[in-house]
Image (cartoon, rainbow, N blue to C red):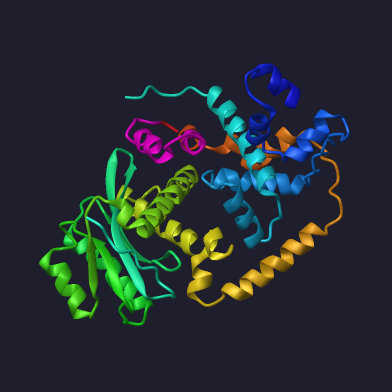
C-alpha cells in the first residue's frame, strides 16, 4: 500500500502518506519493511434463511440502512446480521430490482429558536403538515407526535389543508393521553391553519400551551419533520403492496389512501424499531416496555452470536436473494418505487412517478 502511494505521489513525504491512511503508522511501517504479513479476512458464511429474510426486509423497507435493518431483524426475532453484511445484501437487492426493471416495458413519462429537549414521555408534542402524491392527487397529511419517542399520537389526511384537518390529530392525541395536554408545550409553526382563531381556541380549551416557530423552516422543528419523512418512506411501500394485492379496489382513492395511512402509522409506532431508542419501537417506549424488550433483544442477539457455524448455501446467493425479494411478483410501478430508495432524493422521485400515467 505504502509503495503504491509513494509511486503515485512522488512529492509527498512518508509522514503525510501515513496520516492519510486509515491504518496506524506502526502497522504501515511493518508492512513496508515486510515484517508483518497482511492477513486475508475470510468472509463469514451467512445462513440461507437469514439472507432470504434480510432480502425480504430490504424489499419491504428499502430505505433501511444497516443499523435500522439489523435492529428490525433483531426486534422481530428473524435473525442477526452484521451491519456491513446487511448493506452488502442491500446492494445485491438493488441489482435485482435493476434487472427486474430492465426486462420490463416502462411507460413514457409525461429567527432563532431555543431547542428544548424533552426528558420524558408527554412533555413536548409537535404538529405539522406533510404531503403525499398518489395517482396524480396531492394529499395533505397532518400529524402530531410525542417528541420524546417519535410516537405518532394523531394524524389526519385530506386533499386540502384546512383548520378542521389540523384539529383531528389534537383530539386523537388527547384521547390517547387520557385527556391530559402535554406537560410543557405543543410545538407548531406559523402556518395559516395553526395560527387560526379556531385552532388556538381549541388549544386553549384543553389548556395546551403552544409554542410557535417560523413556517417553512424545518431546522426549527426537526423532530416532526423526521417523523413526517419516515411516515412517507413507509407509506409508499405500504401503498404499492396494497395496490398489488388488490386490497379494497372497490373503494375510492381517498378511502384507500386513508387505510394505507392507518397501516403505515401502525407500522411506524409498533413495528419499526428506532436505533435512537435503543433498538425498540416508539410504542415500546410509550407503553413502558423499553427495558423488557431490550433484554429480550439482547438475549436473542447473544443466542445468534454463539449459534453454530452456518451451513454453506445450497443455492447461488442471487437465487436466495431473489426468493427473499420476490421482485417478479411486484407491479412495474412498485419495482420502480422501491428502486428509487437506492438513489438520491427518493421521495422526490416517487412523487414524480405518482404524477405519471402507469399501468400495472
Q: Quadrant of the N terminus?
A: top right
Q: Is residue 274 visible?
A: no
Task: Give how far across and how far down residue 40 sits, in percent.
Answer: 83, 35
Horizontally, residue 193 falls left or right of residue 233, namely: left
Vertical arrangement, residue 243 with respect to residue 191, above or below:
above
27 vs 95: above or below: below
Would you say residue 357 is visible in this rendering?
Answer: yes
The residue that appears at 83% across and 57% down in the rendered structure is 307
Q: Nearer the viewer, residue 91 or 106?
A: 91
- 360 relative to 278 in the view: left or right: left
Against 220, is 37 above or below? above
Q: Residue 69: x and y, percent?
A: 60, 51
Q: Position of residue 211 (x, y in %)?
A: 24, 68
Who's the residue at 57% across and 37% down the image?
A: 329
Q: Is residue 158 left or right of residue 5?
A: left
- Would residue 340 be counted in the magenta stretch? yes
- In the image shown, does 69 or 14 lie closer to the viewer? 14
In the image, what residue occupies the spot 17% across and 68% down?
A: 199
Q: Quadrant of the C terminus?
A: top left
Residue extent of the magenta highlight: 335-358
Residue 259 appears in which quarter of the rendering? bottom left
Q: Nearer the viewer, residue 326 or 22?
A: 22
The image quarter containing residue 328 is: top right
Amino acid at each position: 500500500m505504502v509503495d503504491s502511494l509513494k509511486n503515485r505521489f512522488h512529492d509527498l513525504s512518508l509522514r503525510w502518506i501515513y496520516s492519510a491512511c486509515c491504518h496506524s503508522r506502526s502497522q504501515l511501517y511493518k508492512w513496508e519493511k515486510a515484517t508483518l504479513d497482511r492477513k486475508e479476512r475470510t468472509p463469514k458464511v451467512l445462513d440461507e434463511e437469514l439472507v432470504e429474510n434480510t432480502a425480504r426486509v430490504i424489499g419491504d423497507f428499502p430505505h433501511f440502512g444497516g443499523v435500522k435493518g439489523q435492529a428490525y431483524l433483531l426486534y422481530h426475532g428473524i435473525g442477526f446480521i452484521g451491519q456491513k453484511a446487511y448493506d452488502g445484501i442491500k446492494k445485491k437487492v438493488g441489482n435485482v430490482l435493476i434487472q427486474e426493471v430492465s426486462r420490463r416495458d416502462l411507460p413514457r413519462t409525461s429567527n432563532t429558536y431555543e431547542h428544548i429537549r424533552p426528558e420524558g414521555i408527554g412533555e413536548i408534542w409537535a404538529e405539522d403538515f406533510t404531503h403525499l402524491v398518489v395517482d396524480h392527487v396531492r394529499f395533505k397529511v397532518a400529524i402530531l407526535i410525542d417528541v420524546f419517542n417519535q410516537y405518532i399520537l394523531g394524524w389526519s389526511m385530506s386533499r386540502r389543508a384546512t383548520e378542521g384537518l389540523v384539529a383531528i390529530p389534537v383530539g386523537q392525541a388527547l384521547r390517547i393521553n387520557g385527556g391530559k395536554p402535554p406537560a410543557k408545550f405543543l410545538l407548531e409553526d406559523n402556518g395559516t391553519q395553526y395560527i387560526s382563531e379556531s385552532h388556538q381556541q381549541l388549544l386553549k380549551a384543553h389548556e395546551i400551551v403552544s409554542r410557535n416557530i417560523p413556517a417553512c423552516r424545518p431546522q426549527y422543528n426537526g423532530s416532526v419533520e423526521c417523523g413526517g419523512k419516515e411516515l412517507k418512506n413507509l407509506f409508499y411501500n405500504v401503498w404499492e403492496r396494497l395496490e398489488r394485492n388488490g386490497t379494497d379496489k372497490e373503494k375510492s382513492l381517498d378511502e384507500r389512501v386513508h387505510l394505507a395511512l392507518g397501516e403505515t402509522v401502525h407500522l411506524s409506532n409498533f413495528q419499526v424499531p428506532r436505533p435512537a431508542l435503543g433498538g425498540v419501537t416508539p410504542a415500546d417506549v410509550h407503553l413502558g416496555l423499553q427495558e423488557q424488550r431490550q433484554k429480550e433483544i439482547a438475549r436473542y442477539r447473544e443466542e445468534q452470536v454463539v449459534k453454530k457455524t452456518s451451513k454453506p448455501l445450497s443455492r447461488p446467493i442471487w437465487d436466495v436473494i431473489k426468493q427473499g425479494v420476490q421482485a417478479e411478483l411486484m407491479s412495474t410501478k412498485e419495482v420502480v418505487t422501491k428502486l428509487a430508495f437506492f438513489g438520491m432524493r427518493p421521495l422526490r422521485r416517487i412523487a414524480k412517478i405518482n404524477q405519471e400515467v402507469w399501468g400495472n
